[in-house]
Amino acid sequence: MSKPSTVSVFTRFAKWAARATGKPGAFVGAAAIIVLWMLSGPIFDFSDTWQLVINTGTTIITFLMVVLIQNTQNRDTEAMQSSWMS
C-alpha cells in the first residue's frame, strides 16, 4: 500500500496559477492593463514615474512567472520519469 501523498500549499497554488494564467482571459486582462497604462500616459505627462510603474510591474510579474514555469516543468519532468521508471 502506498503512503498517501500530501500536497503542499505552494504546489496547490502553483497548479491553480498555472491553469489560471494559461487561459485566454489572463491574456486579455494583461493586454487591458497595458492599454490602460498607455491611455494614462497623457494624464501623467508620460513621466518617469509613469514609466517606472509599468517597468516595475512587468519585472515582478516576469520573475514570478519564471518561478511558476520552473515549478510546472519540474512536476512534469518528475511525472515523466516516474511513469518511465514504473
Image (cartoon, rainbow, N blue to C red):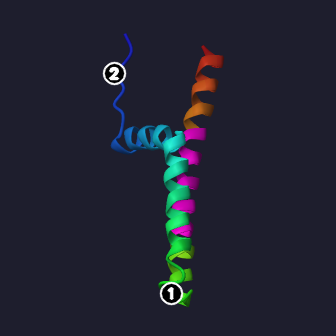
Say which amino acid is labelled 1.
Thr
- Compare residues 86 and 72 and report the one nearer the observer: 72
Residue ID at (55%, 65%): 34
Q: Residues within 10 Å of mark 1 (few under 14, many from 20)?
A: few
Q: Position of residue 71 (x, y in %)?
A: 54, 44
The magenta-colored residue range is: 57-73
Say which amino acid is labelled 2.
Pro
Residue ID at (59%, 47%): 70
Instruction: Tell me how far mark 2 sits from mark 1, CA to CA.
Output: 51 Å
Q: Residues within 10 Å of mark 2 (few under 14, many from 20)?
A: few
The numbered mark, 2 or 1, whose residue comes first in the sequence reads 2
Residue ID at (35%, 20%): 3
Quarter of the image that includes the C terminus:
top right
Q: Position of residue 43 (x, y in %)?
A: 47, 84
Is 8 included in the stretch rendered in magenta? no
> Callout 1: helix, strand or loop?
helix
Residue ID at (57%, 61%): 62
Q: Which label number is shown at residue 4? A: 2
Residue farthest along the top direction in this orientation: 1
Residue identified by numbered label 1: 49
> Callout 2: helix, strand or loop?
loop
Quarter of image, res 6: top left
